Amino acid sequence: MNEEILWDDFLNIIIKKTNPVSFNTWFNNITLLNIKDNKITIKVPYAMHKKVLSDNYYSLIEDTFMNLTGINYDIDFILEDEIEDTNRNIVEVEEKEETRWESNLIENYTFDNFVVGDTNRFAKTAAVAVTEQPGKIYNPLFIYGKSGLGKTHLMHAIGNEIMKKTNKKVLYTTSDMFMNDFTGLAKTNDNTNNLDYAQSFKEKYRNVDVLIIDDIQYLVGAEKTQQEFFHTFNYLHQNNKQIIISSDRSPDDLKKLEERLRSRFTWGLPVDIYPPDFDLRCRILKNKIKNLDIASLIEDDVIEYIANSCDNDVRYLEGAITRLCAYAAMIVPKQINMEFATEALKDYINKNIYDNGDIPSIQKAVSDYFQITIDELKSKKRGKKIAYPRMIAMYLSRMLTDESFPKIGLEFGGRDHSTVIHACDKIEEDLKENSELKNIIKSIKNNITC
């Protein structure tokens, strides 16, 4: 039915059923807006029209349309301003639906391709438990261990699994990204922009169901950022939102972070990941090559050779496979045997892997370089000639072995683990700007022997 014709017919009937004053007052300046879903919407000029038409003329209007169409319509009266608000709401809803939430998750990091062994089984079990009840169990989940052992993979796997099972908002970030976003507050020029940015910052980090933050240790030294993270942590935790954090050391060993932050990190469950043992390294390698073109060419003893050579870092395993693939693409061998693998990886393994490195061998290499004795290195002497080489030796012991801070402290004259942490932090800081120190450490590494 044509709506214009229907409206004209409606008005012709109404004018006959009302007196001229009533018609001119209440009907002459109203219009038919639309007919949709058994509802007729009529636009009126003033709020008084809505009240009078609803209270005094509703039955007349309803019956008139019923007689004209045979349909019992609901009648709705609406003001011009209300039409604009309705349209604005519709646009806003559409814009929100079109805006895709950026979780920053890497989709191919899942539980399915996370290879489990004795050194990471507990961490994997805790991670899966979190996906079953986000915010209710192990909150926060604090995963720690040396770089390259799969912490980041596990965190992304948690986020991907939660998003697959629920409609919860998940955000993955790093401490550097959090710090950069926070310091952006100080870079906004006028007060209006600052307020807008502050609101945007809070919406990003607090309007989530799951916050995953990687490498929390890099907040060391950023006091204001630590304060903001403290407030963000409290807000999320109080609202039962899941928090997942990673670090290269346990909460107790993050001495340079605020005490109130470190204490909160232990509220949930701290879990550590150790370097993979030989069996796990073999299975990781097989998992990484199973979909590659060279998979059928690699002999088992090559897998064992790489696993034996790369025992500190999963990333070294990945690097070895990448180099092997590149070499195979150039040579195109019929079989990748030990001879081929040794040739392909000779530079990589010799330069990067210290497969039998232990603390005594590191101590000897440092002592030889600085022309001091191992006894001096372990002694209580605090002169710069001894103290700084000792810090370097402690740093290398942490980087090149699987030993804990307390164990390293014992190997250096029974020192407290906090002393080892201080040494590692000091050398890491110096390495950022001291190119000579980089060369010293490189030289010492090359001289580490069993």
Image (cartoon, rainbow, N blue to C red):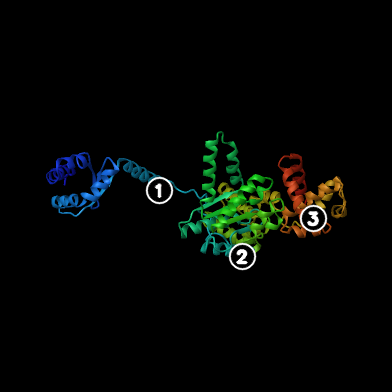
Farthest residue to the left: give it.
16
Q: Residue at x 82, y 53 (%)?
A: 364
Front one among 230 and 154: 230
Q: Residue at x 73, y 49 (%)?
A: 425
Question: How far across and down, in percent of the image, does residue 99 sit?
Answer: 43, 46
Mark 3 or mark 1: whose residue is earlier in sequence: 1
Q: Which residue is mark 1?
A: 97
The three-letter code of the residue at mark 3 reads Ser
The answer, for residue 203, to whether it is visible in the render is yes
| Quarter location, residue 33 | top left
* Above or below for 29 versus 445: above
Question: How far across and down, in percent of the image, does residue 285 sit?
Answer: 59, 58
Disc 3 to disc 1, how far (Cα)? Answer: 60 Å
**Secondary element type, mark 1:** helix
**Secondary element type, mark 3:** helix
Residue 122 is tagged as: 2
Mark 3 or mark 2: whose residue is earlier in sequence: 2
